[in-house]
């Protein structure tokens, strides 16, 4: 599918903008649809003639239909990515996080576009699988509107697969990190918050004892999968976990940051976040079986790139 036109919804955001860079580098033309709610213009190489930017909302069916015209595949990343925002405002976030997906399914059906890559989340498992490597068959337990919208989006994509021949590739991201991740909210990814504060010399707050672990995956490794899923002639049904099956504690993260920066500002340990998962780690055998996965970016290398070192 070289020279094809790929629609990237949410393409001005953290993961989306890295995907745009990768697709352009592979010779594709790219159209970004983004409402700039969290995305930024300067995440995008706007001087590239193969990149087209459409400012619009995926919840607007007509805008989405127009943005899809002429495209051969879609990466659907647009969403309010903050879980807390979905708790605070479930009605508004549902428009982006579910209605946007449904609008896309309809527009794809109408226009005969079949391939869509979808950014779902480990949040669909809730607290299930806690402490073990979580596989895709782990019972789902969406605990927030964000998680419920992601799971419903998965189910609708699968309905359109069975009924209308869409070929969705559904990815459940664990904790993605890297440059351009927005650290500005208390609910932003922990690596973006700690890195920004450490570089600015501001105190760092750990919620709990810092021994909780996450499966951190560097953004370039995620993007490599998304590109494959857009280009492969076939994709199998069924969602795919995106993680490394490696546990890194927040204390290990802090130690790595301290080594890279030659020291850390004061670190305080407070109460754990209500409902926090203690240990989250992906069983990634399905990912390894379905996609070419070269050795992933080592954690410290990814961290160094984020810090610009
Ligand atoms: P992000 O906030 O940087 O990117 C989301 C992009 O979507 C932004 O550019 C935003 O402006 C845009 N957007 C939001 N609502 C929109 C709407 N209604 N119409 C058009 N554009 C809209 O977040 P991200 O971390 O890059 O997340 C990308 C996707 O991956 C999201 O779907 C998110 O839920 C999912 N995800 C991310 C992680 C992670 O660790 N970062 C984990 C699980 C799932
Ligand atoms: C992440 C996702 C969330 C998803 C969940 C599912 C992000 C931003 N969030 O949540 O969408 O539902 O995975 O697995 O990617 N922490 C601190 N100090 C801080 C900030 C965070 O100690 O300033 C702690 C948190 O309490 C948590 C850990 O760091 O224990 C990771 O937090 P966070 O980056 O928000 O991700 P998850 O909670 O794993």
Image: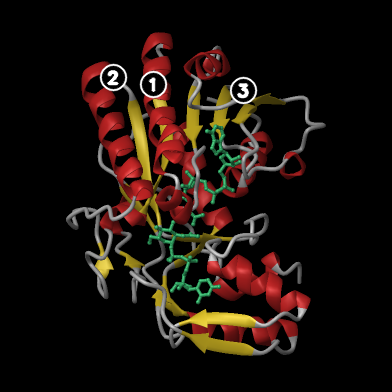
Mark 3 or mark 1: which is in front? 1
Quarter of the view holding residue 194 = bottom right
Q: Is mark 3 within 8 Å of ligand 1?
A: no
Binning the other alpha carbons within 10 Å of mark 2 as few (below 14), some (14 to 19) or many (20 upward) gives some
User: Which is nearer the eye, 47 or 203?
Assistant: 203
Q: Are marks 2 and 1 in contact (CB under 8 Å)?
A: yes
Tell me: residue 229, above or below residue 268.
Answer: above
* Lower position in the chain sequence, tag 3 or tag 1: 3
Tell me: residue 174, above or below residue 232.
Answer: below
Looking at the picture, how far across and down is residue 27, in whole percent?
66, 31
Q: Is mark 1 within 8 Å of ligand 1?
A: no
Q: Which residue carries the number 3 mark?
A: 3
Q: Which residue carries the number 1 mark?
A: 114
| Secondary element type, mark 2 | loop
Q: Is residue 54 left or right of residue 296?
A: right
Could you tell me which residue is drawn at 27 percent across and 69 percent down? 133
Q: Which residue carries the number 2 mark?
A: 165
User: Which is nearer the eye, 104 or 225?
Assistant: 104
Q: CA distance from mark 3 to mark 1?
A: 17 Å
Quarter of the view holding residue 41 = top right
Q: CA distance from mark 2 to mark 1?
A: 7 Å
Looking at the picture, how far across and down is residue 195, in whole percent?
66, 72
Could you tell me which residue is drawn at 44 percent across and 29 percent down? 100
| Secondary element type, mark 3 | loop
* Lower position in the chain sequence, tag 2 or tag 1: 1
Residue at the right extreme of this rendering? 47
């Amino acid at each position: 599918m070289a020279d094809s036109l790929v629609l990237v919804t949410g393409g001005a955001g953290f993961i989306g903008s890295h995907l745009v860079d990768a697709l352009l580098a592979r010779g594709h033309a790219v159209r970004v649809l983004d409402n700039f709610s969290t995305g930024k213009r300067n995440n995008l190489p706007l001087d590239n003639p193969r990149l087209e930017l459409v400012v619009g909302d995926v919840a607007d069916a007509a805008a989405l239909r127009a943005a899809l015209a002429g495209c051969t595949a879609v990466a659907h990343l647009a969403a309010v990515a903050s879980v807390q925002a979905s708790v605070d405002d479930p009605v508004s976030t549902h428009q982006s996080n579910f209605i946007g997906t449904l609008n896309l399914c309809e527009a794809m059906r109408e226009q005969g576009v079949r391939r869509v890559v979808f950014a779902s989340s480990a949040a669909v498992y809730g607290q299930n699988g806690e402490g073990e490597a979580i596989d895709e068959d782990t019972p789902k337990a969406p605990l927030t509107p964000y998680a419920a919208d992601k799971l419903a989006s998965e189910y609708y994509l699968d309905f359109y697969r069975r009924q209308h021949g869409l070929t969705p590739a559904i990815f459940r991201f664990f904790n993605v990190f890297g440059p351009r991740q927005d650290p500005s909210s208390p609910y932003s990814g922990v690596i973006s918050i700690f890195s920004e504060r450490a570089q600015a010399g501001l105190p760092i707050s750990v919620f709990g004892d810092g021994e909780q672990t996450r499966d951190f995956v560097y953004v370039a490794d995620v993007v490599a999968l998304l590109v494959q899923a857009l280009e492969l002639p076939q994709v199998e049904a069924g969602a795919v976990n995106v993680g490394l099956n490696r546990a890194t504690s927040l204390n290990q993260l802090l130690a790595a940051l301290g080594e890279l920066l030659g020291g850390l500002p004061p670190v305080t340990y407070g109460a754990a976040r209500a409902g926090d998962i203690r240990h989250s780690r992906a069983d990634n055998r399905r990912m390894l079986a379905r996609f070419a996965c070269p050795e992933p970016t080592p954690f410290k290398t990814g961290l160094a790139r984020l810090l610009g070192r």
